[in-house]
Amino acid sequence: MISDIDKQLIDEGLILDKELSAPEIVKRYIVKYRQATGPNAKRNIAKSNKWFMKRISKDIRLSRNNAFEQFKSTSRKRTPKDKGIIGRMLLFKYDARHKDTLPVWDMFPMGFVFNSFVGGNGYGESGVQYFSMINLHYLPPALRLKLFTELLKFNNDTALREKSKLILSWRVLKAFSKSELAAHCVKTYRADHVRSELLEISPRFWEICIFLNIQRWAKGSNALAWKGV
């Protein structure tokens, strides 16, 4: 059932029916965007990408736990063994196995998965499920946008809808124009160290979520994570 507030926002052209499923924090930015650029302003275009980058990256006091709970209550749940996670944007809680020796690591990884495999044959622990992804938190906002824009060229759909996903593999990532940015963000995660469900972020909201300051560096900082790019 649509709330009176949401109905008013729809009537004012500040939010669309298909955007009502977003977490509250995402809906808030959509409303702010249309208040600034006009009712019914289009999203998922170059103009909106840049607006969200400039606006969202300023909000450094975001409550990570609160934001995570919002996504948890609205997002599709996935598992590390699910082959359908390839090309999807995921958010989850993580506890790094080698956290004592890592210079920096993220407790709330978010990004695009491009591989899922069982350890053995020279990589990882035999029988352990792993998955690799581009964790966008390892780039500053402007470079996230550059990488994101390039990655969208691998979208399997002409628009960004629920069925959209990126056609990704390590071979594809090494060959495309922003490969150095992608390589900086590539991280591999052990399924047995994931501390939540994998939350799939709807493609409709990618352009907003990539800029949320939801990263939590258990060790290190933005400066260390972004060093060298």
Image (cartoon, rainbow, N blue to C red):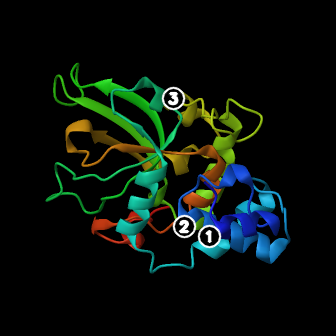
- The residue closer to the viewer here, 182 or 163, is 163
Gap in Å between the C-alphas at discs 2 and 3? 31 Å
- The residue closer to the viewer here, 153 or 55, is 55
Give the label on residue 169, or none.
3
Q: Which of marks 1 and 3 is nearer the N terminus?
A: 1
What kind of residue is marked 3? Ser
Marks 1/2 in contact by CB < 8 Å: the verdict is yes
Please tell me which residue is depicted at 76% across the width and 63% down the height of the picture: 10
The reply to whether residue 27 is visible in this rendering is yes
What kind of residue is marked 1? Arg
Quarter holding the N terminus?
Answer: bottom right
Gap in Å between the C-alphas at discs 1 and 3? 34 Å
Q: Classify residue 139 as left or right of residue 38.
A: left
Determine whether 41 is above or below 118 in the image.
Answer: below
For label 1, the residue is 28
All told, the count of numbered labels is 3
Q: Earlier in the sequence, mark 2 or mark 3?
A: 2
Give the label on residue 25, or none.
2
Mark in front: 1 vs 3: 1
